Amino acid sequence: MHFTGRTWRPNYEADSCIIQLTSGCTYQKCHFCNLYKDEPFAISPLSEFEEDLNEIKSYQPNARRIFITGANPFALSYERIKPYILTVRDYLIKCQSIAMFASIRDIKNKEVWQLRKLRAMGVNGLSIGTESGDDDTLILATKGYTSQDILEQCRKLDEAGIEYYFVYMTGLAGKGAGYRNAIRLTICS
Ligand code: SF4
């Protein structure tokens, strides 16, 4: 398998097969994060991705879910990510869903019809590090989007039928602001 640098997945993806499509993060500006500090963003060649699918097939030919790694492989445009997604079932014919990390910013570059097509190809279960639904906290963390952006982009996912999960950082708002952060998250979700 081709894994570059730091590789991780959410704990609820423990039963998924892990495969790399990107390494590093396209953004690198969240002020609390140094996960990919020394790792420039890169896209794995399709040939490498296929080699890894083949290797997964040799061990788990009946794999039903894969989780694509990289901080935000969903940053790839629809046209760029499509050949990777379409290749998965060439190797894993029983694969039912293809999950990955995504940012709110990564959804912005896709139209609803493109999201629907990706859903039809098997993309489902995006893990989105929204961290907060509170604009003051999002600015403090330099997340690069607002609570309104979260609502708008996730409505597109809803329209396309793509499931998603939020990663929320409870202490991100700072001392004394946890209640405000929590309340605004519920408004946003
Ligand atoms: S988008 Fe995610 S990986 Fe990238 S800097 Fe922010 S928190 Fe870190």
Image (cartoon, grey):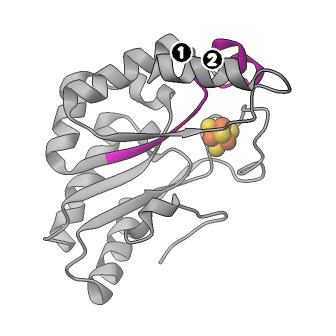
In percent of the image, x 39 and y 15: which residue is there? Answer: 152
**In the image, what residue type sits under mark 1?**
Ser
Cα separation between marks 2 and 1: 6 Å
In percent of the image, x 55 and y 23: which residue is there? Answer: 185
In percent of the image, x 27 and y 22: which residue is there? Answer: 111
Outermost residue, right direction?
175
Residue 155: percent from left, percent from top: 31, 20
Q: Check if residue 154 falls in the magenta segment.
A: no
Residue range in magenta is: 125-143
Q: Kindly identify which residue carries mark 1.
A: 147
Between 155 and 172, the one nearer to me in the picture: 172
N-terminal label among 2 and 1:
2
Q: At numbered mark 2, what does the secondary structure look like: helix, strand or loop?
A: loop
Outermost residue, bottom direction?
59
Q: Kindly identify which residue carries mark 2.
A: 134
Residue 19 visible here:
yes
**In the image, what residue type sits under mark 2?**
Asp
Q: Is mark 2 within 8 Å of ligand 1?
A: no
